[in-house]
Image (cartoon, rainbow, N blue to C red):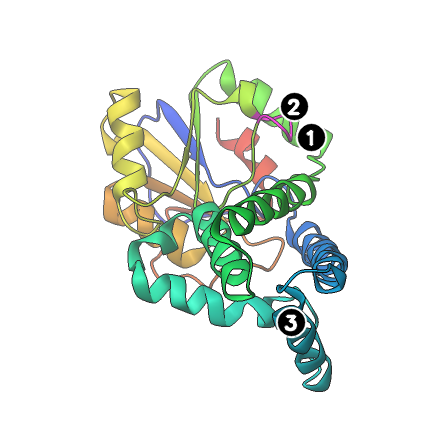
Amino acid sequence: MRFNRRIGAIRAISFDLDDTLYSNKQVMLNTIRAMQCYFDDRLRVLSSAKTSTNDVIKPLIDHAKKNNVAIGSTSFWAPYAKQVLTSNPLIKNDVTAMRLHTYTLGFTQLGLPKLEAQAEAEQAMLHFSLHRNKVTVPKNIHQLLSNLKKRYRLVAISNGNVCTKTIGLADYFDYTFHAEKNLKQKPSCDLFQLACNKLQLKPKQILHVGDCGYADILGAQRAGFHSAWLNCYDIGKPIHALPDIELNQVTDLTKLF
């Protein structure tokens, strides 16, 4: 643990979620594989159906095989994601909406009628959410949050779409804030300012804890928050601004408060 600056009286602590309170890398790798299997099965079912749709999907599957692109992989959906972003740049802030629109557009361009494409996309999102939220939060993190909650107001601030209720963390937080279309992702100040407004606290009364030197630390400093950086899972981007505190692990917070 290293102190780079003295911090004042803290009344609340905001936490990033993925790769701060738990490791998320394997969860996402498992989710990617699960979605590839899901789409591989689903598109094969659609291609074998006795409708005009299979005239579009079967050649696409053959083309993907020929070019060594896994059906349903990130590369497979990338052209549709690019089209979604081009038509609606702000949607990049809402990763759930971005994925849903990508799937919907993809299924539409694969030949499905609009309503059927929407239904397929929604079912795919349910499958994605199921696997994306298979997060195991370590027991010491539950203990940490339980102890901190006795003295501080706690909030979660995330660019991602993990469900704190599903993974068992919701009860520790007064609020959970996710980026969305009209709330830009960190390092924008939008989510930090919203936290201040909801908590009715000044930025200097809040410490933000996160793994990404860009989104979390730079974002917190831009918003006037104190910042604590850790990168024990080696996922977040390097430091773009000097944090007030550098942590070896998030449980080091017990030594501070």
Of mark 1 and mark 3, the one earlier in the sequence is 3
Q: Is residue 225 visible?
A: no
Q: Please name the residue that numbered disc 3 is placed on.
A: 55
Q: Is residue 134 left or right of residue 224?
A: right
- The amino acid on which the numbered mark 1 sits, given as a three-letter code, is Asn
For the residue pair 1 and 70, the one nearer the viewer reads as 70
Q: Is residue 206 magenta?
A: no
Give the image location of residue 82, x and y in percent.
Answer: 42, 69
38 is higher (above) or lower (below) than 200: below
Q: How many residues crowd mark 1 within 10 Å: few (<14), some (14–19), many (20+)? A: few
Give the image location of residue 206, x and y in percent.
Answer: 33, 31
- The amino acid on which the numbered mark 3 sits, given as a three-letter code, is Asp
Distance CA(mark 2)–CA(mark 1):
5 Å
* Residue at figure coordinates x 50%, y 65% from the top left: 109
Q: Please name the residue that numbered disc 1 is placed on.
A: 140
Say which element carries label 3: helix
Give the image location of residue 223, x and y in percent.
Answer: 25, 43
243 is higher (above) or lower (below) than 14: below
Q: Is residue 32 visible?
A: yes
Give the image location of residue 208, x and y in percent.
Answer: 40, 38
The stretch in magenta equals 165-169
- Residue at the extreme top of the image, as rendered: 150
For the residue pair 47 and 91, the one nearer the viewer reads as 47
* Residue at figure coordinates x 67%, y 58% from the top left: 32
Q: How many residues crowd mark 3 within 10 Å: few (<14), some (14–19), many (20+)? A: some
- The amino acid on which the numbered mark 2 sits, given as a three-letter code, is Gln
Circles 1 and 3, Cβ within 8 Å, touching? The answer is no
Q: Please name the residue that numbered disc 2 is placed on.
A: 143
Give the image quarter of residue 181: top left
